[in-house]
Amino acid sequence: MSPSARSFYEKFDKDFENISAMADGELREDQEAIYREKMQNSPAFKEKFNEYNKLKKTVESIPKLPEDHYFVSRLNEYIKKENKKTSGLRPFYKPAFGLVALTVVLMSFFKLSPEFMDDLFETQKGNIIDFYTKNLRPYFQEDELTKDDIFNFAFSQVLPIDGSGQNVISLDESGSGASIAIRQSSFGDSIMSLKEFTEKLDLDKTQQLKLNNVLKNMRIRFGVPSL
């Protein structure tokens, strides 16, 4: 199409757009006067204006739907249900290579610096006990706490609160102070069992005993005398 022909069709479309705006009462008075004059000289413009007017009257004649005050509430509930259906089907998005590399780095680090693990648990021990006694004790009985629970909370600050593991208590220290939240578990939660940790780092008997003693002391401090 030549530039002149394209310009002609663009102008023609613009004229029809303005005629539609005039039918809706959205055109300025000076523009409306121009297009009323054009309609007198152009049967095509007049026919298009009548067509838009007829369409407008047809739309206005359709009865309005009754107002539904609970539509938004029902829509929100529907969206929540749909999100729950799809959340469990979401593929695991963490790259496998990254997890393998992280595991190798952790294993090497703990092998070369075994004292770090002792310092970590010693430091976390007081924090976890204080946090539990002040915040978490109301949510479950002390005898429900296992070594795995204590171990996982020390590392990931996430504690499962039901048998399925779908609901967790998480600790958030991003703000000015620590806060807790009860929420559904997600793929972003790093939950590693004590057995998996021991196997991945290939801990010897002495290291396993030391780790078990730390967890046992913490559990006793929680008020559970036996493991």
Image: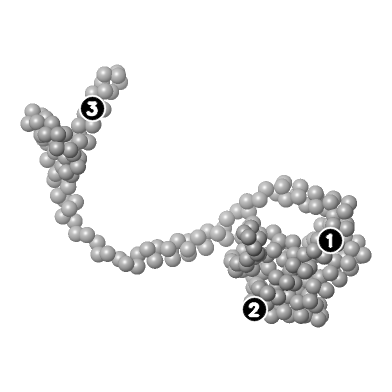
Q: Are marks 1 and 3 in contact (CB under 8 Å)?
A: no
Mark 3 lies on residue: 11
Q: Residue furthest front?
A: 176
Q: Position of residue 158 (x, y in %)?
A: 68, 65
Kind of residue at disc 2: Pro
Disc 1 designates what residue? 119
Q: Is residue 166 left or right of residue 206?
A: left
Identity of the residue drawn at 26% across and 23% down: 7
* Image quadrant assignment for residue 21: top left
Question: Which label sits in the foreground, 1 or 3?
Answer: 1
Mark 1 and mark 3: Cα distance apart in space: 78 Å
Q: Amino acid at mark 3?
A: Lys
SS for callout 1 = helix
131, 156: nearer the viewer: 131
- The amino acid marked with disc number 1 is Asp
On-image quarter of the N terminus: top left
Q: Nearer the viewer, mark 2 or mark 3?
A: 2
**Residue that badge 2 annotates:** 138
Location of residue 135 in the rendering, given as x and y in whole percent from the top left corner: 66, 73
In front: 180, or 74?
A: 180
Quadrant showing the C terminus: bottom right
Label 1 crowding class (10 Å Cα cut-off): few <14, some 14-19, many 20+? few
105 shown above or below 192? above
Indicate the secondary structure of the residue bearing disc 3.
Answer: helix
Q: Secondary structure at mark 2?
A: helix
Residue drawn 13% across and 31% down?
34
Where in the figure is residue 223, as x and y percent of width and height? Answer: 76, 80
- Residue at the farthest right position: 206
